[in-house]
Image (cartoon, helix red, strand yellow):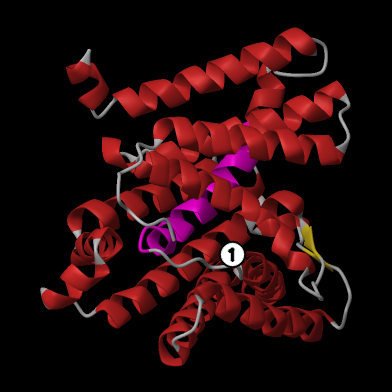
Amino acid sequence: MKKIKQSQFYGIGILLLLVVAFWGIFKFLAPATFGSPDKLLTYAKSALIYAVGGCGLYFICVMGPFDFSVGANIVLSSIIACNFSMRFGYVGLVVAPLICGALIGLCNGLVYIKLHISSLIVTVGLSLIYEALSVYATNGKNVILSTSYRAFGDYPANLILALFAYCLCGFILKYTKIGTYTYAIGSNEVVAKNMGVNVPKYKVIAFALAGFFFGIQSILTISFGTSMTSASNLSSMSRNFTPLMGTFFGLAFKKYGHPVIAIVIGEMIIQLMFNGFVALGAPTTIQNVVTGAALLIIVTLTTKPVKGVVVK
């Protein structure tokens, strides 16, 4: 039994069982409005989008910091994607948000390193600036993606782009110096620094990489939703938490060696829960309470605490 639990596929098995369990529970409670094959494909569309953002956040969160400008980045990058698609077609739709997202991430990383203050404070403060830029870019109006450039909003284009993001994330984490140093810093920043790792440099790289993945998410977001409204007063903050939930699954199951797969399956679990409560007609407040509690329980049960370690 001990060998089974140490297997790299044990964690994936647990996640797949959770998928089946949540589907079965909500299908039993709401058989007419939940869980049909067509609906599952729709749930998967949303899960694919949020999992891309979860992969980006993983580079940051595995080292300790957080990025609370995810929503503002997605809003601004989506608006940029929509505007540039009008001039340059699919090239503008794809390239512009990738550059925008990466630049925002780079800016976050540089400000975080230079100011030496909490990443939460830095990214929340910068979110206000990015939101102001989104208002300026749209003049406060809603932008709509042309029907000629919505291929990434449906299968198979969205799946191909999402798979590219997942494979890229997995490759960087497993086969590059960036991934090695990212885990080293996350494991023990002081030891990594003493071993010669340039900690500030790789934290900036992590933020820039995260921004690049948020750029990919923005392509999928604007293509799926077809429109985007500028944000203000931190209204974009609500977009932060669903990708972050997927990242938590990745962090909880990274000991099995498949964080990217855990993020993807975790986002599917979250979508099953969200849509399950919608099918039951539960109020939004109840959905949030139960979903948050379930997430805490799942992460608690799958993360083994280490005695003597200070939680930060």
Q: Residues within 10 Å of mark 1 (few under 14, many from 20)?
A: some
Q: Which residue is mark 1?
A: 90
Tell me if I can see residue 95 in this picture: yes
| Picture coordinates of residue 190, whole percent (x, y) | 22, 72
Q: Please give left or right for residue 27 compared with residue 156 in the image.
A: right
Amino acid type at mark 1: Tyr
The quarter holding residue 88 reads bottom right
In the image, residue 203 lies in the stretch drawn in magenta: no
- Residue name at image x 82 percent, y 30 percent: 278
**What residue occupies the far bottom of the structure in this picture?**
114
Q: Is residue 216 left or right of residue 109?
A: right
Looking at the picture, tell me which residue is in the foreground, 214 or 67.
67
Query: Is residue 62 located in the magenta-colored stretch of the structure?
Result: yes
Quadrant in which the C terminus is drawn: bottom left
x and y percent of residue 103 in the render? 50, 81
Q: Quadrant of the N terminus?
A: top left
Residue 203 in picture, x, y percent from top left: 35, 74
The main secondary structure of the magenta stretch is helix
Considering only vertical position in the picture, is 108 above or below 159? below
Residue appearing at x 42%, y 64% in the figure: 60
- Most extreme residue toward the left, as rendered? 195
The boundaries of the magenta stretch are 42-63
User: Judging from the image, what secondary structure is the residue with disc 1 in?
Assistant: helix
Residue 135 in percent (x, y) is at 81, 81
Residue at screen point 65% across, 25% down: 40
